[in-house]
Image (cartoon, helix red, strand yellow):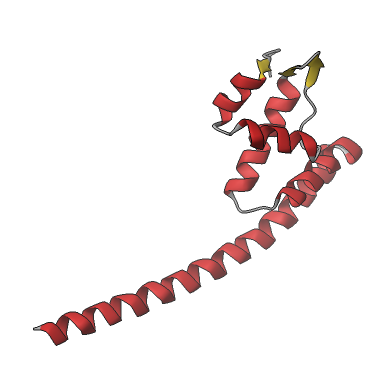
Amino acid sequence: MSGKRLNFKEMCAEFDVTPRTLRYYEYIELLSPEKDGRARYYGPREIGRMKLIMRGRRFGFSLEEIRQFLLIYDEQGTEAQMKTWIELADRQLGVLAEQRAQLDETIADLQKLRDDSAKTLK
């Protein structure tokens, strides 16, 4: 990644997050921006971490799971992180499949109830 740096406002805009969210990610040590007085600057490492955070949230991982995943890279390197990622992804795929099955069942139940109600009106 290039040496791109973003200030606090740019980082919020780039990832479509609120300032409160970005500050919280710093507070729970997901991000560690460079500080110059009160100004914060996010370099390539922090931008990359933010991409992983946003992707993890989209996939339904908790912030603690994401924090632990990022910590593995810092402490053990890429290979350990990838092995952990596979385990987490497998588990999350199971969770999402179960949620989809429940949602499909709910949709079918609602559709049947709706259709029965429509027949009653005719």
What x and y, as percent, mark residue 23?
71, 33
What x and y, as percent, mark residue 88?
72, 55
Query: In the image, is 122 to the left or to the right of 57?
Result: left
- The total number of labels drawn is 0
Q: Which of 90 and 15 is in front in this view?
A: 15
- Residue furthest bottom as drawn: 120
Quadrant in which residue 1 is drawn: top right
Residue at screen point 67% across, 33% down: 22
Q: Nearer the viewer, residue 15 or 51?
A: 15
Query: In the image, is 120 to the left or to the right of 83?
Result: left
The quadrant of the rendering that contains the C terminus is bottom left
Quadrant in which residue 44 is drawn: top right
22 in relation to 111, above or below? above
What x and y, as percent, mark residue 116?
22, 84
114 in relation to 55, above or below? below
What x and y, as percent, mark residue 2?
68, 14
Quadrant in which residue 94 is drawn: bottom right
Query: In the image, is 16 to the left or to the right of 28?
Result: left
Q: Nearer the viewer, residue 27 or 1?
A: 27
Residue at screen point 81% across, 13% down: 37
- Residue furthest left as drawn: 122
Residue at screen point 74% across, 19% down: 40
80 in relation to 105, above or below? above
